Each structure stands twice: as structure tokens, then as C-alpha cells.
Amino acid sequence: MAEALFRPLSKRDGLQAKWSDGRSTASVAAEFIKPNARLTPVERLEIYARSYWFRVLDCLYDDYPGVRAILGERRFMALATAFLANFPSASFTLRNLGSRLPHFILDQPALSAPRTPLCADMARFEWAQVVAFDGEALPVLTGDDILDAGPNRLRVSLQPYLTVMECSYPVDEFALALKKRDSALRGEASNALTSMPGSRPVARTPLPRPQHIFVAVHRQKNMLYFKRLEPEACAILAALRDGRTLSAACAAALRGSNPAVDWASRIRDWFQAWQSLGWFCRRSKRGRT
């Protein structure tokens, strides 16, 4: 039953005529599904297969609008179908469905060429938004927690819903541009009955050019946000996330940095901002939270 559901549908959105071993799908379906007065076994099975595929494809379609805008509708659906054929739904929640999509894009570059690097960055950024939306929030680290341990011993963790990432494209700006475009399209639709003939259509959002950025994706008061980071700030957060002490994280991040910069003041400002945003939590006894 699972094999039948997880095999991609035909071009006509039905079950494929042949089974994986070459037998007819109709004969295989008849082995474990009975007909009824109106439907054959394969027709009954097809109802479930269509329900599965329409639902999971719709989920990826909604969760990855940026990747969809980069590839276009047809190529995105081909990518999504190939991805789901390799990584079918394996969780009780569709929230986890696209977790492997960034890696799949890099493993199968032909499906997104020549825009594979941009698609991979965008998929990582959009998956980070899924994590930020409903990721676990642990008790925030307090000032007393920090004072109880010196910088050479202090190990903190980042909130599970927070993702810090390095990208080769300004995916945050592209995401904002897409939202602005979508808002314009909704405005055009709401004014369709009263707009003048010959109204100019909303232009397609230009694809971003390469730009090295560092960004944090998080939530605040149940709202999604993304925040640009300086390279050293991103390195410190990543090192803390990976289990380094505060002292080691700062030392590694500032290695080779400009000595003319007042790094002590800058790091103090960063930590005050991060602490106010609630990004830090206690590190679990098992290590990384």
C-alpha cells in the first residue's frame, strides 16, 4: 500500500500503469484491495494515491515560494515530485516534509541548474522559517546564569527555533521582494472590477545577484523575523551553538580580524541585543539542544 502511494502519479494524475517490477499496477492492486460495485481495485487505490500526492505537493508549494519563484511553476513541481519520490512523508506532521530539500537540491543539481546554488540557499532560508515558526522555545538564559560562570567555562545554547546561516545570495531581500510583489498582486485582484483597462501587470521579481551575507532567522512574539549579522557575530553564534565556551567562541571568531576595531564594545552590544531577543538558553546535559 505504501509503495503504491509513494510512487509518483502519471502525467494524467493517475497511478502508473506498470508496477516497479514490470507487472501491471491493476494486477498488483487486485492482490490486496477488493473491488466494489462501482470501482475496481486500482481505481480505489488511485483515490488514496491522488489524495497523498496532491496534499504533499501542495505543502511544498506553500512552504517554498522562493524556490518556486526562482525555478518557475513547472520546474518547481518537477523538483518537488522527484524529491518526494526519494523522501516521502515519514512523519505524523507535514511540518517536517521539506527538511531535506536543501540537501536534495545540491545532490541533484540537474533539477535546478543553472540556479542550483541560489535554489539551495533559498531552500535553507525557507526551511529556517519553518523552524522559526513552530520550533521549541526553551527557558531563556538569565543574567544570573551568565554571572555564575566565567567566560572560560560558560557554555550556552541557542534557542531551537533560531537559525544562523551564511548564504551566497541575499535571500532575505529576495523574500521581502516576493512578499511585496504578492501584496501588489492581491491589490490588483481586489481592484479588478474597478481598474481601468490596460492596467500594467506586476513585473516579475528579478533574481538576486551573488552577495555573501550572514543572517539569523528567528521569531519574536509569534512573528517571524530575519536579521542581518556581521560575519564575526555569525561566527560567535555558530560556535556557541556547536558547544564552544564563550571565550573560545569569541577568540575563534575574531582570529585575523581588524585590530583597529573596538571588538570588546561591539561584542558587548551584540550580546545585549541577543539577550534582549531571548536567543540564549541553557545547554542541556546531553550537549546540543
Image (cartoon, rainbow, N blue to C red):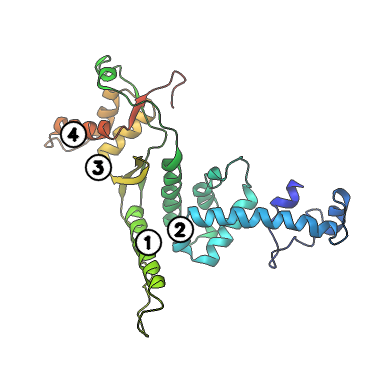
Label 3 and label 2: CA atoms lie apart by 27 Å
**Viewed as shown, does residue 87 lie left or right of 148?**
right
Residue type at mark 2?
A: Pro
- Asked if disc 2 and disc 1 are in contact, CB closer than 8 Å, the reply is yes
Label 3 and label 1: CA atoms lie apart by 24 Å
Viewer-nearest residue: 199 or 65 = 199
Query: Is label 3 in a helix, a strand or a loop?
Result: loop
Mark 3: few/some/many CA within 10 Å (<14, 14-19, 20+): few
- Indicate which disc, 3 or 2, sits on the residue closer to the N terminus: 2
- Asked if disc 4 and disc 3 are in contact, CB closer than 8 Å, the reply is no
Viewer-nearest residue: 88 or 107 = 88
Q: Position of residue 253 (x, y in %)?
A: 27, 33
Viewer-nearest residue: 22 or 157 = 157
- Indicate which disc, 2 or 4, sits on the residue closer to the N terminus: 2
Query: Is label 2 in a helix, a strand or a loop?
Result: helix
Q: Which residue is mark 4?
A: 269
Q: Could you tell me which residue is drawn at 85 percent across and 53 percent down?
A: 28
Label 2 and label 4: CA atoms lie apart by 35 Å
Label 2 and label 1: CA atoms lie apart by 8 Å
Q: Which residue is mark 2?
A: 65
Please state which of the two labelled residues, at mark 3 or mark 2, is closer to the viewer: 2
Q: Which residue is mark 1?
A: 178
Residue type at mark 1?
A: Leu
Identify whether 81 is placed above or below 100. Answer: below
Q: Quadrant of residue 165?
A: top left
- Indicate which disc, 4 or 1, sits on the residue closer to the N terminus: 1
Q: Residue furthest top?
A: 148
Q: Could you tell me which residue is drawn at 35 percent across and 67 percent down?
A: 184
